[in-house]
Image: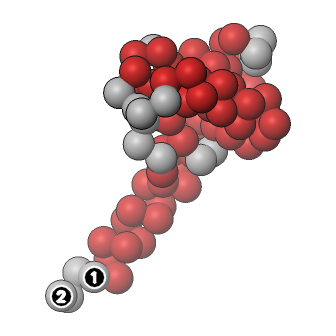
Amino acid sequence: MLGFVCRMSLEPDSCVRSTQNLFYRHGVRALVVPKFIPGFSTVAPPLAGIVGMGAATFLFYDTIGAVVWAGISTGVGAFFSNQ
């Protein structure tokens, strides 16, 4: 999946390498952010499996990311509801 997403970029090799390095550097915290970055949310689950993350840890941090994303989206919608 990562290879497919990165094939659309200008430098596919550096895209794959930089995404993997980002995940290795930030570990489980990298699962909270992908909801906000187009494309990264597609490759985060396979990368979690590649680095050997457990299912419970993955579900915990992925749920946190989803709740944060939904909360911010709802908050922005509520803020601009009168516009």
Left or right: residue 72 versus residue 65 is left
Q: Where is residue 45 in the image (x, y as percent from the top left)?
A: 57, 22
Residue 78 placement: quadrant: bottom left
Q: What residue type is labelled 2?
A: Gln
Callout 2: 10 Å neighbours few (<14), some, many (20+)? few
Which element is circle 1 on? loop
CA gap, disc 2 to disc 1? 5 Å
Q: Residue at x 66, y 25 (%)?
A: 17
Image position of 12 with respect to 35: above or below: above
Image position of 9 with respect to 71: above or below: above
Q: Residue at x 55, y 30 (%)?
A: 15
Farthest residue, direction bottom: 82
Q: On the image, numbered disc 1 is attached to which residue?
A: 80
Q: Which residue is drawn at 48% across and 15% down?
A: 3
Image position of 19 with respect to 13: above or below: below
Q: Which amino acid does label 1 sit on?
A: Phe
Mark carried by residue 69: none
Q: Position of residue 23 (x, y in %)?
A: 71, 32
Q: Can residue 77 be seen in this view?
A: yes
Which element is circle 2 on? loop
| The one of 19 and 63 positioned closer to us in this rendering | 19
Q: Position of residue 68 (x, y in %)?
A: 55, 55
Left or right: residue 4 versus residue 47 is left
Callout 1: 10 Å neighbours few (<14), some, many (20+)? few
Give the colour scheme of this rendering: secondary structure
On-image quarter of the N terminus: top left
Q: Which residue is drawn at 79% across and 29% down?
A: 24
Q: On the image, numbered disc 2 is attached to which residue?
A: 83
Tags 2 and 1 in contact by the CB under 8 Å rule? yes
